[in-house]
Image (cartoon, rainbow, N blue to C red):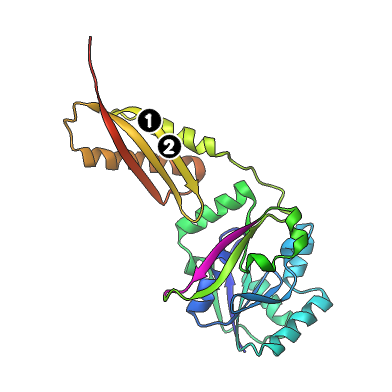
Amino acid sequence: MIVYSLSGPSGTGKSTSALVFAHKIGVEAIIDDGLLIVNGVKVAGLSAKFEKNTITAVRRAIFTDDAHCEEVKKALHTYKVQSILLIGTSDKMTKTIARQLELGPIEKYYYVEDVRSQKEIAKARFIRQTQGKHVMPIPYRQVEQNFFKRLVQKGKEIFSSKREKIGETTIVRPDFQQEYIEIGKHVYVQLLTYCCAKQEIVHKVEQVQFLLGEQAQTTITLQLKLPIDYSLPDRLYALQENVQAEFYQHFGYELDAIHLHIKSVMLKRKF
């Protein structure tokens, strides 16, 4: 069996990228948080995200429970897995998983920075810290029913570059994820409104829409002052840069898109 490792700190988006990355390097199976996933479908194991605290979650993820370990080892044989990607928070963790499951040595080590941009990593960390959300790279229908007592949402369908469906994700909030502060949408809207309103060319901020999902983006509708005796594109680009800088300063990650709609202009009069 060919064994690969993908590691990085918690909350950096490894599980989010795992299906696409595994498909890209030609790997059929994934071990993630105690689950064995083959071709995008869970076939064995119990997720560490069902555990009550971080200690038992780590033990589950590294297969210290004999029955759990044997179940996954048996499934690896049943499904004749020839290549596998082990996901963990460090090389030490993926080495432990390989040893517990008797997979043999790890052939190549990858890191979250190899599969995600710094911008994506920063946004993933922000969502983990402020919403407590985790991603499971398995379909919604495969999440055990007792998990419905907690937050659980459909994630997204994952496609290859050739538009072939290779899996799905599910978003959950485990019991052990208790340290998070959820930021209300109005906070983002107020900051974006303030950033725009203080710009010299802006007469009024009419509307601000904000979306934080796969893409973090805002659509802002403005009235501008007259006279427009300047390069309008240049000033609007500068406004976008100011909004981006202040957003990053407050939240620690960048917006993916800032859409400006100029609804009307307002004549600035002196009496």
Residue 195, image quadrant = top left
Looking at numbered disc 1 in the image, what kind of residue is underneath it?
Answer: Val
Specify the amino acid type for callout 2. Answer: Val
Residue 137 place in picture, x, y as percent: 61, 68
Which quarter of the figure is the N terminus placed in? bottom right
Quarter of image, res 140: bottom right
Whether residue 96 is situated above or below residue 249 in the rendered picture: below
Q: Is residue 109 above or below residue 264?
A: below
- The residue positioned 28% from the left and 43% from the top of the image is 237
- Secondary structure of the residue carrying numbered label 1: strand
- Disc 1 crowd rating (10 Å Cα; few below 14, some 14-19, many 20+) is many
Residue assigned mark 1: 205
Query: Alpha carbon of mark 1 to alpha carbon of mark 2: how far?
Result: 8 Å
Q: How many marks?
A: 2
Q: Which residue is mark 2?
A: 208
Residue 148: give its label.
Answer: none
> What's the magenta region?
153-161
Query: Does residue 197 appear to the left or right of 39 in the view shown?
Result: left
Q: Is residue 244 left or right of residue 101?
A: left
Q: Is residue 269 above or below residue 196?
A: above
Quadrant housing residue 268: top left
- Residue drawn where x is 53% and y is 35% of the image: 186
Q: Is residue 99 left or right of residue 24?
A: right
The reply to whether callout 1 and callout 2 are in contact (CB within 8 Å) is: yes
Give the main secondary structure, helix, strand or loop, of the magenta stretch: strand
Q: How many residues crowd mark 2 within 10 Å: few (<14), some (14–19), many (20+)? A: many
Residue 185 falls inside the magenta stretch = no
